[in-house]
Amino acid sequence: MKDGFLDTIIQLEKQIQAEVATEKKRAEAWRERELAALETGVQAASTEIEERHRQILADKKAAYQEESAALKAATSRWCHNLEELDDTRLREVLQEHLKTILPGGEDDHPHGKG
């Protein structure tokens, strides 16, 4: 009877070891599937972020190009207007600006000493 009991224990031990090995294989397969799913998710998120960044850059570039074109047009109009000024008006404007920039005139000493 002891041999039968010992044989049963050995059989059970072998069965448990086989089940543990099977469970390890299942766990490893599950881990591999989960890692693959995570890698796929990370790659998809990375691709989405890159695409979003590309779109933001394209939008900014377009906005800056529009702004550049508007500034160029305004500058061109300003230059054209300056070219159209006659010499008399140009001298008047220049004198007004020079009065504020250069010392001299009636109030060139704001501290009161002349």
Image: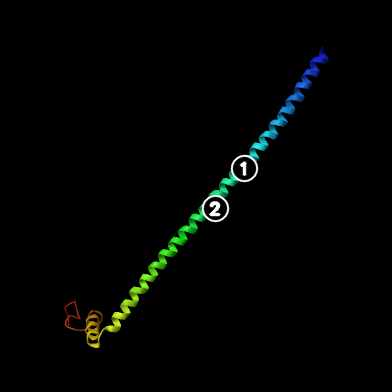
Q: Quadrant of residue 10?
A: top right
Q: Secondary structure at mark 1?
A: helix
Q: Amino acid at mark 1?
A: Leu
Given residues 65 and 95, the one toward you in this image is 65
Residue 55 drawn at (x, y percent): 47, 58
The answer to whether the residues at label 1 and label 2 have Cβ atoms under 8 Å apart is no
Residue 113 drawn at (x, y percent): 17, 80
For the N terminus, the quadrant is top right
Of the residues tagged 1 and 2, which is closer to the observer? 2
Residue 58 drawn at (x, y percent): 46, 61
Crowding near the residue tagged with mark 1, few <14, some 14–19, many ≥20 C-alpha atoms within 10 Å: few
52 horizontally vs 13: left or right: left
For the C terminus, the quadrant is bottom left
Q: Which residue is mark 2?
A: 47
Task: Give the residue at x 71% y 31%.
Answer: 22
Task: Give the residue at x 25% y 80%.
Answer: 101
**Cα distance, mark 1 to mark 2?**
18 Å
95 horizontally vs 70: left or right: left
| Outermost residue to the top | 1
Residue 35 drawn at (x, y percent): 62, 42
Q: Secondary structure at mark 2?
A: helix
Crowding near the residue tagged with mark 2, few <14, some 14–19, many ≥20 C-alpha atoms within 10 Å: few
Total marks shown come to: 2
Q: Which residue is mark 1?
A: 35
Q: Amino acid at mark 2?
A: Thr
Task: Please determine whether, in this image, residue 55 is positioned above or below residue 6.
Answer: below
Task: Give the residue at x 67% y 37%.
Answer: 29
Q: N-terminal of the two: label 1 or label 2?
A: 1
Task: Give the residue at x 66% y 34%.
Answer: 27
Q: Quadrant of residue 77?
A: bottom left
Task: Please determine whether, in this image, residue 13 is positioned above or below residue 52.
Answer: above
